[in-house]
Structures are given as C-alpha cells and as structure tokens.
Amino acid sequence: MSSITPFKNSDDQKTPEKPINTEKPSMKTLEKFVTQYKLNLSPKLTTEQRYKLMNVLYQNRDVFAKDISEIKKKPTKTMN
C-alpha cells in the first residue's frame, strides 16, 4: 500500500498574524495620537473616514516612530 502526501514548501508557511485588536479608542485618543506622530491626514475625509483611518494607524502604532531615536536597528549578520 502506498500513499501520497502533498509537498509543503517553506514559503507556504505563513508567519503568524498579529491578533486583531477590537479596541475602539475615542476620537480624543486618536486625535492625540495623530498630533503626537505629526501625521498629516487629508482635510477632505468625512468624520467617519477620518476615524477609520486614524483607528487603523493607531492599531498599528508599533511601526511608527516619533523621532529618529525610536527607530530600532536590525541586527546584521556578517559573512565569514
């Protein structure tokens, strides 16, 4: 008896996704975030669009830096 198993390439392995945050921050919190990070959002956005955009940015705030000192250096590998 023989069997066939599908080949799984390492590229097929997905990296774990960030858990979805269902937090609904207040408009005041979001406006403060936008101000602190000096984000320039279009004045043409409706209130609802502005809230949604600010919320997405806020939920991913770990990828933003207020200044150069907050940018982390990625370790490099040396070739021998």
Image (cartoon, rainbow, N blue to C red):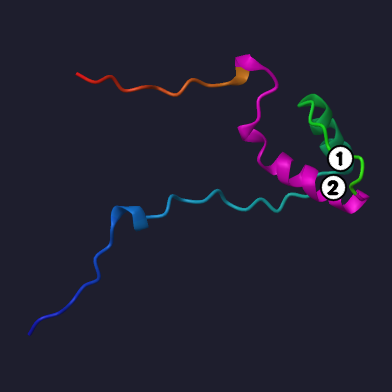
Residue at far top of view: 69
Q: In the image, is 72 to the left or to the right of 13?
A: right
Please identify the residue farthest to the bottom as the structure is shown.
1
Kind of residue sitting beneath label 1 = Ser
Helix, strand or loop for disc 2: helix
The numbered disc on residue 23 is none
Q: Quadrant of residue 79?
A: top left
The x, y position of residue 13, in whole percent, is 36, 55
Q: Which residue is mark 1?
A: 42
- Label 2 vs 1, first from the N-terminus: 1
Residue at 92% from the left image edge and 40% from the top image edge: 43
Query: Is residue 43 on the magenta stretch?
Result: no
Residue at mark 2 to residue at mark 1: CA–CA distance:
12 Å
Of the pair 31 and 77, the residue shown nearer to us: 77
Verify whether residue 54 appears in magenta.
yes
- Say which quadrant the N terminus sits in: bottom left
SS at mark 1?
A: loop
Magenta segment range? 46-69
Amino acid type, label 2: Tyr
Q: Residue visible at 36% across and 58% down?
A: 12
Of 28 and 44, which appears nearest the observer? 44
Residue at left offset 83%, top offset 28%: 35
- Density class for disc 1 (Cα within 10 Å; few <14, some 14-19, many ≥20) is few
At which x and y percent is residue 70?
Answer: 61, 19
Taken as a whole, is the magenta stretch helix, strand or loop?
helix
Do callouts 2 and 1 mark residues in contact (Cβ within 8 Å)?
A: no
Residue at mark 2? 51
Residue 56, x across and y down, in percent:
72, 46
Q: Is residue 51 left or right of residue 63?
A: right
Q: Quadrant of the C terminus?
A: top left
Residue 48 vertical placement versus 3 (above, below): above
